[in-house]
Amino acid sequence: MSENKHPYREAYIANTRDHRIPEELLQMAEAQFSPEQVVDELIQYECEKTEEFEELVGMFNMGYQKMIHNMDIEPYEVGADKIHMIDTYALLQHHFEQVGAVDGKLGGFVHDGHMYLRDDLDFVSFLERYSHEFMHLVSKTKKVIEVFVNEQEWGAMYGTRYKTLRSGVHQISERDTGTVQYGAGLNEAITELFALQLRKHTNFPEDVDNETVADLQSNVTTYESHIEILREVLRKYAEVDIEDETVKSEMLRMHIKGDPTFLKRLHKAFRDNDMPEGIKVLFSMNSTLESVREVRAQLGITE
């Protein structure tokens, strides 16, 4: 299968009533915007791709096609040009500059349709991290293009900025009080659940020993506590197992194409148990373990 356009990645011009912005400028901003853009300051530290690396990219693409078979999800192939192995120091430094915090365990991240991984991962860690970031990369995303005006003494200066509104079930909105995020922890749990499914559908190279393959295809490797919260919510409130094939299909379609069926299931489960605020509590969970403990207590889930 040849590389194609991501079927569930959206970008649009934000509505504006600012009469100072010419219509042609809006059209130009939309025409020049691409939802798949590289981070220039990282690409200069990219390591050369090997033939074995490109084989692994193809291997996971085939696993993904098998995973979404008969799921009413349009196929998509991630090209090797969208995957970048970056010098570890440069990647961690860039992350620090973006978020203002040091995360020495950071294995990689996805940004604007490209995946960036640190170059010092051992082979197994690479497979674990790649599968997780792959599921971020293929998830439903929505960005907005904003054109703004800065008034100067000599006249108006126009600029553009691009904001992510959604990635999987992670939603981001701007308020007067600052940026508000919903679903970050739930998004990571679902992403890792399907990273495991991706590994189960992937045929690994023959030189990977059977014990390693068995471990990769049997266990989640990150966000275990977040997954356990989702498992218990489904068991306690929806009376269904997280491994139920219908439930997994609903979650996968929500993650990749934005299908609302799974969220409707959760809404109904919480309402039927006289807990209408339950969905809001679940979506308040972020990526930290402290947040997991708070959500567990609010939802009445014992350890």
Image (cartoon, rainbow, N blue to C red):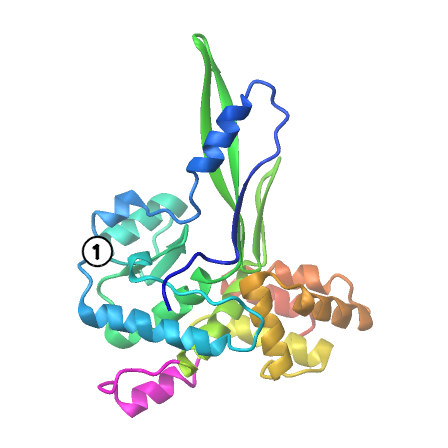
Q: Residue furthest bottom?
A: 210
Residue 292 colored in magenta in the image: no
Percent from the top left, x then y, of residue 194?
49, 74
| Residue 217 location (% of width, % of height) | 40, 84
**Residue type at tag 1:** Asp
Circle 1 residue? 87
Is residue 39 found left or right of 207 in the rendered image? Answer: right
Quadrant placement of the C terminus: bottom right
**Quarter containing the N terminus:** bottom left
Q: Is residue 270 visible?
A: yes
Q: Which residues are magenta?
A: 202-219
Where on the picture, by quarter, is residue 262?
bottom right
Residue 291 visible somewhere in the drawing: no
Decide which of 284, 243 is in the foreground and name it: 243
Q: Is residue 29 left or right of residue 179?
A: left
x, y percentage for residue 6? 46, 57
Q: Residue 61 versus residue 89: which sits nearer the camera?
A: 61
Q: Residue at x 33, y 86 (%)?
A: 213
Left/right of residue 224 with respect to residue 211 in the rendered view: right
Q: Residue furthest top?
A: 154
Q: Depth check: give the residue in front, 5 or 199.
A: 5
Left-right relation of 95 to 172: left
